[in-house]
Amino acid sequence: MTNTSADIIFRYFPNLTEEQRRQFCDLDALYKDWNSKINVISRKDIDNLYEHHVLHSLGIAEIVNFSNGTRVMDLGTGGGFPGIPLAIMFPEVRFHLVDSIGKKIRVCEAVVEALGLSNVTTQHARAEEIRFKEKFDFVVSRAVMPLADLVKISRMHLSRVVHNALPNGLIALKGGELEREASFVSHTKLITPLSDYFKEEYFETKKVVYVQC
């Protein structure tokens, strides 16, 4: 099964199963089709789907290898990033995708169904209004709000029982200068440049921020 657009994923993650490779390949047609109906990715950027969205999401997989049974909330998922690529990468991990825009959640649901991802659930809600009895091991997010606000919301939803080598917390994909933003967060944090892992120019200013909550 080939999809030259998805080759960038296979270069960095060569040990995928055939099912995972198929699912990553299928993202191209699915998102191009849905983006023609509902603009979940900038139309100028849809041709960069794999580098700017899928691989960027998988930067989190370079920071933590989620153990089976881990529960992850994707806060402000938009069109399903980083949650859907991570759900493909970690089929034994449960992902709950949350966004305040209903049409974006509908796209997520359609993509999840088309891919056959049984480890993903979705919720249409504003971040500050989320009511969910289950606690999560991690909250992941992709630059939806300032880091201090993400930490405040994440703490409400995190379990105190640790199942991974990395303690429970927030893992956020961020870009640009982070020193001032991170200075408002007093918790233990780790800022990792994605250029340490991915060599494309796009990742020169991209970082993964982990905050132990």
Image (tube, rainbow, N blue to C red):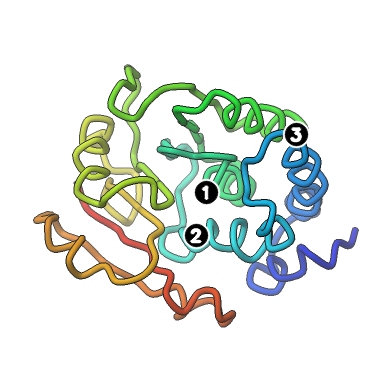
Select label 2 or label 1 by which is in front: 1
User: Going by the picture, which residue comes out furthest to the right?
Assistant: 1
Q: Earlier in the sequence, mark 1 or mark 3?
A: 3
Mark 3 highlights which residue?
37
Q: CA distance from mark 1 to mark 3?
A: 21 Å
Q: Earlier in the sequence, mark 2 or mark 1?
A: 2
Q: Which mark is residue 61?
A: 2
- Residue 99 vs 191, above or below: the answer is above
Residue 212: x %, y % from top left: 21, 52
Q: Which mark is residue 117?
A: none
Q: Earlier in the sequence, mark 2 or mark 3?
A: 3
**Helix, strand or loop for disc 1:** loop
Select label 1 or label 3 by which is in front: 3
Residue at position x 65%, y 40% in the image:
39
User: Going by the picture, which residue comes out furthest to the left?
Assistant: 186
Dot 1 surroundings within 10 Å: few (below 14), some, or many (20 or more)?
many
Residue at position x 32%, y 46% in the image:
145
Residue 64: x %, y % from top left: 42, 59
Mark 1 highlights which residue?
82
User: In which quadrant will I find the N terminus?
Assistant: bottom right
- Residue 150 vs 183, above or below: the answer is above
Dot 3 surroundings within 10 Å: few (below 14), some, or many (20 or more)?
few
